[in-house]
């Protein structure tokens, strides 16, 4: 006979994962009073300030975003700098800027495990290629630099727009 399931975790379809349950996936239902973050009790500060914090439905902060599936299409909302490497302290490629309102697709995303200095933001870096609909863009939009051969950070790392987002994902 199979051993019984532990008392704290019972495999069953749960409300938030209804779509996953429809695909046959199961999630873990927790018994009332048992937190995913029991190991953090006694630490100073708020539990969500720690990197090993796990989101749960009773959290006061929002659920983390789902990971982006590639290829994805983005639009720049501010002028973006092209970096040589995908990390916060990387050198910029001199003379290369991606202008505002430029569309591009992304072939690779790197999320370094470092914060932007002075903030709690964690940037992502995007390796670009021409947007899949670039054949249908106006002629003046076709000659724009989209950062091919370098990396674009989704957040401005310096200047007057520090630390605002400089790209926005578009879903067509």
Image (spheres, rainbow, N blue to C red):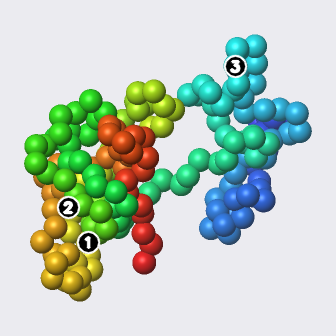
Across and down, in percent, residue 8 comes to 81, 35
Residue at horizontal 10 percent and vertical 48 percent from the top: 95
Q: Quadrant of residue 6?
A: top right
Across and down, in percent, residue 23 comes to 62, 67
Give me the disc on residue 146: 2
Residue at horizontal 78 percent and vertical 59 percent from the top: 15
Q: Quadrant of residue 42?
A: top right
Give me the disc on residue 45: 3
Q: Nearer the viewer, residue 32 or 97?
A: 97
Badge 1: how crowded within 10 Å, few (<14), some, or many (20+)?
A: many
Residue at horizontal 36 percent and vertical 42 percent from the top: 160
Q: Residue furthest right?
A: 32
Residue at horizontal 15 percent and vertical 62 percent from the top: 145
Q: First in sequence: mark 3 or mark 1? A: 3
The CA distance from mark 1 to mark 2 is: 9 Å
Secondary structure under tag 1 reads loop
């Amino acid at each position: 006979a199979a051993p019984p399931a532990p008392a704290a975790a019972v495999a069953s379809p749960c409300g938030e994962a209804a779509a996953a349950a429809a695909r046959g996936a199961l999630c873990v239902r927790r018994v009332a009073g048992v937190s995913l973050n029991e190991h953090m009790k006694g630490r100073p500060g708020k539990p969500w300030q720690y990197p090993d914090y796990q989101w749960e439905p009773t959290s006061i902060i929002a659920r983390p975003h789902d990971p982006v599936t590639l290829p994805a299409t983005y639009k720049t909302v501010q002028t973006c700098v092209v970096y040589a490497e995908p990390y916060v302290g990387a050198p910029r490629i001199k003379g290369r800027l991606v202008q505002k309102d430029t569309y591009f697709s992304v072939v690779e995303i790197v999320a370094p495990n470092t914060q932007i200095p002075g903030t709690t933001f964690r940037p992502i870096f995007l390796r670009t290629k021409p947007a899949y609909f670039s054949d249908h863009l106006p002629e003046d939009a076709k000659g724009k630099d989209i950062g091919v051969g370098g990396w674009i950070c989704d957040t401005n790392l310096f200047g007057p727009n520090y630390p605002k987002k400089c790209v926005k994902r578009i879903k067509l």
